[in-house]
Amino acid sequence: MKNAFLREKETKQALSEFILNTNQFSMGQECEKFEHKFSRYQRRTYSLLFNSGGSANLALLQALKSLGRLKDGDKIGFSSLTWSTNVMPIIQMGFIPVPIDCEINTINVMSKNLIQRIKEVKLSAFFATNVLGYSGDLDIIKTLCADNDILFLEDNCESLGAEMPTDKVGNFSLASTFSFYVAHHMSTIEGGMLCTDDDELYQVLKMTRANGWDRNLTETQQTKLREPYNISPFNSKYSFFELGFNLRPTEITGFLGQHQMQYLEENIAIRNNNHRRFETVISQNDDLLLVKHDHMHQISPFGLVVLCKTPELREKYLTRFIAAEIEVRPVIAGNMQNQPFYSKYVEVMYDLPNTDFIHNNGFYCGNYPELSDADIDVICNCLKK
């Protein structure tokens, strides 16, 4: 990204005025307003704002453990092509991570990959990552998980605004998480959201987010929690009912989220327009592979993924991009099993040939609304054979 926000000048001006005029900076009504606005956009019953998408992932797994829906030693599938904070909470919560390979042509876990893994391993949950603005065949994965008694969760931090034919990506699971870190589809500097339609999970997540206390629950919910322990109103101020963390956002996060949402559809539309131009060039170059997304209604391209047919070709195109002063990165973290932390905590390793192919043959660069026509031309020239 060239800027921290879309419409940087207007956003900074609005933020300055908010800071000068507000009387509260800790989590409050601005955060609640953003949560309600995001629920309407995403079309889910509840949204809960966190200080990051990674925190939302951590809180989600803790809440499911607190509810007894997951327990120590449960095997949790995860998309092998993912970000660290999708996997680390699985380990931190005492579960066993089980990577699921993706398909090369979609860069996402598809139902066929999940079917193969559950033939070998009994999974208690599958925490899918919807990668870089794309997704797998989530409708089929949802049914597959239901038929096999697998809790289905979505890390949608990279695919806000993407849609399947039947619903928005992020709506196929028990709960989904989102990130508003700088350079994501919308920015609150740091920040994340968790969406669910589950009343019980939502209640426990509110406590998990804030120290394990009940301050953010309704009066009826508080009474139900306090009565078995004979907790007085005075002692309730410092009473804790669930294992929790301090993962609360600030009112600045809530204000920025509301402000940036007015630009979200424009942001996604521009990214798609850019992406179509990139795809046209890639389709004419037989050194490169197109990312397949015809099973989706709309993608929300987080970045431009460049998949080369061989590692040697990747070096060729990487050299071009770097010479043109275009910032390039690996396709997320590659095979997560190869990350330094992983083998310290996980004993069993799996064969992940497609993830290895993407790691060895791919890279990506930014695709964001501030790209000028000249910037896009530079990128397109680098993509030509």
Image (cartoon, rainbow, N blue to C red):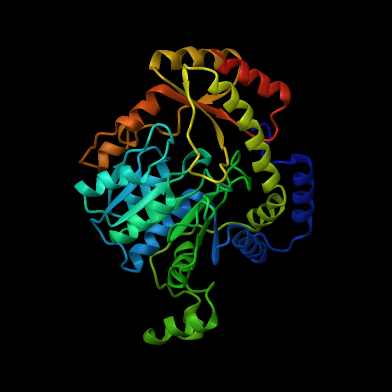
Instruction: Using the image, determine if residue 213 lies above or below residue 193.
Output: below
Quarter residue 253 falls in: bottom right
Q: Quadrant of the C terminus?
A: top right
- Left or right: 190 in relation to 213: right
Q: Residue at x 50, y 39 (%)?
A: 294
Q: Quadrant of the N terminus?
A: top right
Residue sitting nearer the eye, 85 or 99:
99
Q: How many marks?
A: 0
Instruction: Using the image, determine if residue 375 lies above or below residue 58.
Output: above
Q: Position of residue 380 (x, y in %)?
A: 62, 20
Instruction: Using the image, determine if residue 185 lies above or below residue 93.
Output: above
Quarter residue 204 falls in: bottom left
Instruction: Using the image, determine if residue 236 lies above or below residue 136.
Output: below
Q: Residue at x 47, y 52 (%)?
A: 55
Q: Position of residue 220 (x, y in %)?
A: 51, 84
Residue sitting nearer the eye, 2 or 12:
2
- Left or right: 349 in relation to 178: left
Q: Position of residue 206 (x, y in %)?
A: 49, 67
- Left or right: 365 in relation to 336: right
Q: Residue at x 26, y 39 (%)?
A: 344
Q: Is residue 91 visible?
A: no
- Left or right: 371 in relation to 295: right
Q: Residue at x 70, y 33 (%)?
A: 370
Q: Is residue 333 visible?
A: yes
Q: Position of residue 63 (x, y in %)?
A: 39, 63
Residue sitting nearer the eye, 64 or 281:
281
